[in-house]
Image: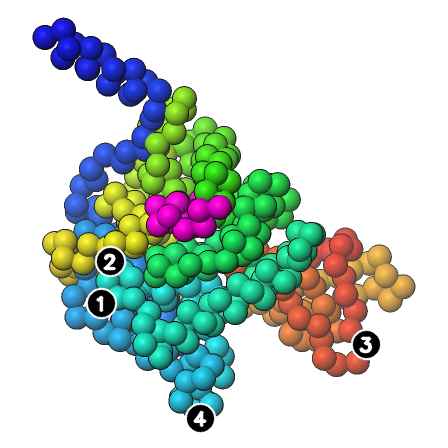
């Protein structure tokens, strides 16, 4: 009896020293409603709309799309495998001129693992080789002294390492070292602030390497980097409960769910984040397919790291199309906006036709399309950035950084 008491006391001490991120069960009807929002996206099988993240999110959730899901994976395979360099289709098919980006190729490899497939054979070898080439290019762009930057982002760099890891492909220490250095020296930044999405993706990549016993010479640095990322994400929690913002919270939770932390209020922070997410769901915040695909695994207590050994036989509820009637589409009103820049030798003034409700960025882009105006802008998300290109005609004028006045009539 005395031994039992000592054992229970020891468990209590260990529980006080470590904390885990647990997400309590969520009403299955809420998960089904969230999954139903992905069904219309799965009907879009053109190259412009195919997104492997949609398939990964469903496979790591408790719901499924049935035949639609299978057709979606088939469409992904036809698109991504045929259009890789070296494919018999890539040189003859005009539709294959646009090769998959590094991020999309990485997500496609995650989709294969979500279906319990490995990238094998000639087609699989091309997939892996292409992703490794992408990483090598990014490695050279960063440079041996770490003073450069990836052509894409550290988010896509971490995603690429994660994709290779879940396919059990060893990654050179030099490639992993670039991401380690970035975390150790606060390089996962976006527009001069800490990026929760980027840090979480790096942490997921490191967690996969650690669990797979890869890069053993860097194991201590990998372990420390995971802890560093966890701590920074916890510090980024807002008073409302989000990690960074509502849309970066699902990926942050995926990382926090993968490993415990000692001496941290991890469980409390995760519970607070879950409450905030459920409130956002009730308000209809999650409509974007990419954001939904990152949240569904969390609600099913899954993460991208589970793709190391996915459970493809787990029962999942069949989704039925939503029965709600879609609102009628209203044609937006076109208005005229006057854009003027007065701090030039030749002040710019032009009436720009745009849709009612357009943002300032929309006005600047429309002015660029009309000619003679070259704005410059950058998006705030890790997943996308937009920048108006240079005008090809003679004598374009760039007004970046100059005071701009906009008036509508």
Q: Please tell me whether residue 366 is drawn above or below residue 33 in the rendered image.
A: below
- Residue in the picture at 72% in, 79% down: 392
- The residues tagged by marks 1 and 3 sit, at their Cα atoms, a distance apart of 51 Å
Regarding mark 4 in the picture, which secondary structure is present there? loop
Residue pointed to by mark 1:
69
Label located before the other in sequence (1 or 3): 1
Q: Residue furthest bottom?
A: 92
Regarding mark 1 in the picture, which secondary structure is present there? helix
Residue pointed to by mark 4:
92
Q: Which span of residues is magenta-colored?
A: 203-217
Query: Is 96 contained in the magenta span?
Result: no
Query: In the rendered image, is residue 204 in sight?
Result: no
Label 2 Cα neighbours within 10 Å, binned few <14 / some 14-19 / many ≥20: many
Regarding mark 3 in the picture, which secondary structure is present there? loop
Q: Disc 4 or disc 3, which is closer to the eye?
A: 4
Q: Disc 2 or disc 1, which is closer to the eye?
A: 2
Q: Is residue 10 left or right of residue 84?
A: left
- Between 309 and 35, which is closer to the camera in this rendering? 309
The reply to whether callout 2 and callout 1 are in contact (CB within 8 Å) is yes
- Between 15 and 195, which is closer to the camera in this rendering? 15
Label located before the other in sequence (1 or 4): 1
| Figure quadrant of residue 354 | bottom right
């Amino acid at each position: 009896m005395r031994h039992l008491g000592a054992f229970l006391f020891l468990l209590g001490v260990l529980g006080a020293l470590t904390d885990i991120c647990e997400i309590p069960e969520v009403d299955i009807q809420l998960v089904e409603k969230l999954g139903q929002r992905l069904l219309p996206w799965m009907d879009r099988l053109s190259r412009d709309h195919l997104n492997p993240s949609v398939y990964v999110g469903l496979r790591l959730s408790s719901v499924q799309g049935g035949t639609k899901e299978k057709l979606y994976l088939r469409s992904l395979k036809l698109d991504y495998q045929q259009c890789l360099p070296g494919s018999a289709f890539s040189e003859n098919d005009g539709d294959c001129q646009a090769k998959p980006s590094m991020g999309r190729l990485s997500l496609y490899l995650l989709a294969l693992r979500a279906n319990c497939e490995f990238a094998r054979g000639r087609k699989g070898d091309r997939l892996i080789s292409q992703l490794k080439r992408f990483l090598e290019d990014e490695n050279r762009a960063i440079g041996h002294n770490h003073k450069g930057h990836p052509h894409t982002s550290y988010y896509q760099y971490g995603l690429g390492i994660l994709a290779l890891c879940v396919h059990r492909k060893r990654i050179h220490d030099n490639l992993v070292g670039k991401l380690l250095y970035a975390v150790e020296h606060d390089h996962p930044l976006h527009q001069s602030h800490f990026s929760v999405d980027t840090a979480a993706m790096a942490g997921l990549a490191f967690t996969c390497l650690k669990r797979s016993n890869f890069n053993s010479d860097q194991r201590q640095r990998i372990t420390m980097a995971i802890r560093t990322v966890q701590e920074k994400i916890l510090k980024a929690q807002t008073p409302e409960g989000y990690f960074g913002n509502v849309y970066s919270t699902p990926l942050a939770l995926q990382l926090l769910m993968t490993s415990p932390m000692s001496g941290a209020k991890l469980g409390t922070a995760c519970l607070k984040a879950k409450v905030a997410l459920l409130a956002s769901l009730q308000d209809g915040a999650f409509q974007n397919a990419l954001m939904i695909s990152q949240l569904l695994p969390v609600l099913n207590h899954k993460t991208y790291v589970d793709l190391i050994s996915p459970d493809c036989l787990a029962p999942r509820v069949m989704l039925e199309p939503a029965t709600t009637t879609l609102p009628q589409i209203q044609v937006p009103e076109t208005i005229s906006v006057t854009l003027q820049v007065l701090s030039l030798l030749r002040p710019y003034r032009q009436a720009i036709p745009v849709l009612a409700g357009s943002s300032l960025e929309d006005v600047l882009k429309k002015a660029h399309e009309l000619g003679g105006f070259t704005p410059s802008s950058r998006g705030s998300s890790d997943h996308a950035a937009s920048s108006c290109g240079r005008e090809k005609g003679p004598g374009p004028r760039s007004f970046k950084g100059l005071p701009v006045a906009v008036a509508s009539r």
